[in-house]
Image (cartoon, grey):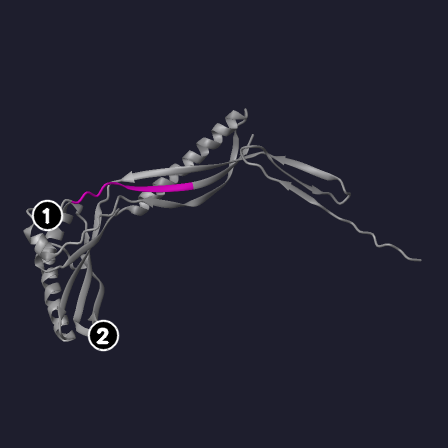
């Protein structure tokens, strides 16, 4: 006698909802009867914003030298950068405030009639200068270029207590998310029973426009005053997703 096997299928239906409705989950019981347990939740997104004036700046300076031989280009470049760093130290900057970023030595060529002719060598030394007094940015740029720096660029403004400000933005984001959840609950004629989950969605910074200065030494020496620099404000943003259970 041919017997058909008995096939038993258990199913689970899960429906989740945010502010538009409740999340409902149910599972089949061993006897085949579904016991549904209703769980009402709201899910909100909160944002926090902190604005602060920067209190630290970093400036990239470079000195370049060209010569027919690589050794002479190196020598001239070392002389120029030494003069720049001595001037900066003389202005009261600590040794730790100066950091070498890159050193380059490369040949330069002329091209004519399809032929490549060696013109000479370029030596370039780039350093980063950290300033804890952003009011001195213009002064330091003027001093560096007047001492032998051939280019200035990538001025960045920063916050010394950035981590503290980021946590404040995060706190504000949670407060905002909870207030939104409470407003949604009130609109339903309900209230919050408990917050069951909070997830950080990441933080973003909206920095002030970065001034980019490229100045040749002769132009700076002819300038009547140090270049004006405006730091603006730094914005730190945080975003969280909050899930709360309703009463």
Residue nearest the observer in this picture, 225 or 164: 225
Label 1 sits on a secondary structure element that is loop
Q: Is residue 107 left or right of residue 237?
A: left
Viewer-nearest residue: 144 or 9:
144
Q: Nearer the viewer, residue 235 or 116?
A: 116
- Which numbered dot is residue 115? 2
Residue 108 on image: x %, y %: 20, 70
Q: Residue at x 16, y 57 (%)?
A: 151
Q: Nearer the observer, disc 2 or disc 1?
A: 2
Q: Please tell me whether residue 234 belongs to the stretch shown in magenta.
A: yes
Tell me if mark 1 has few (under 14), some (14-19) or many (20+) residues whose alpha carbon lies within 10 angstroms of its own. Answer: some
Range drawn in magenta? 229-239
Q: Position of residue 5 (x, y in %)?
A: 84, 54
Which residue: 11% across, 58% down?
89
Picture quarter with the C terminus: top right
User: What residue is disc 1 on?
Assistant: 226
Mark 2 / mark 1, whichever is N-terminal: 2
Task: State the image quarter where residue 47 is shown.
Answer: top left
The tag on residue 153 is none
Q: Quadrant of the N terminus?
A: bottom right
Q: Are marks 2 and 1 in contact (CB under 8 Å)?
A: no
- Residue 139 placed where, x, y %? 11, 49
Q: Quadrant of residue 207?
A: top left
Above or below 51: residue 4 = below
- For the question of whether residue 91 can be seen, the reply is no
- Residue 128: give x, y in percent of width and height: 20, 58
**Res. 130 visible in picture:** yes
SS for callout 2: strand
Q: CA distance from mark 2 to mark 1?
A: 44 Å
115 left or right of 169 in image: left
């Amino acid at each position: 006698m041919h017997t058909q096997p008995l096939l038993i299928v258990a199913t689970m239906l899960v429906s989740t909802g945010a502010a538009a409705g409740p999340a409902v989950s149910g599972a089949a019981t061993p006897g085949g009867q579904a016991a549904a347990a209703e769980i009402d939740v709201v899910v909100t997104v909160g944002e926090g914003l902190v604005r602060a004036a920067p209190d630290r700046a970093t400036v990239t300076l470079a000195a370049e030298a060209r010569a027919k031989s690589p050794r002479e280009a190196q020598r001239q470049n070392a002389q120029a950068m030494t003069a720049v760093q001595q001037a900066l130290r003389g202005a009261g900057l600590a040794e730790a405030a100066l950091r070498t970023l890159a050193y380059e030595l490369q040949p330069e060529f002329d091209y004519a009639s399809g032929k490549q002719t060696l013109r000479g060598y370029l030596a370039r030394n780039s350093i980063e200068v950290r300033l804890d007094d952003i009011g001195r940015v213009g002064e330091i740029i003027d001093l560096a270029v007047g001492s032998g720096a051939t280019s200035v660029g990538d001025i960045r403004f920063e916050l010394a207590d950035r981590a503290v400000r980021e946590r404040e933005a995060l706190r504000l984001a949670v407060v905002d998310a909870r207030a939104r959840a409470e407003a949604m609950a009130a609109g339903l004629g309900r209230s919050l029973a408990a917050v069951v989950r909070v997830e950080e969605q990441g933080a973003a910074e909206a920095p002030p426009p970065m001034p980019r200065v490229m100045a040749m030494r002769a132009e700076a020496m002819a300038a009547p005053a140090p270049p004006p620099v405006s730091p603006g404000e730094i914005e730190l943003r945080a975003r969280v997703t909050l899930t709360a259970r309703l009463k």
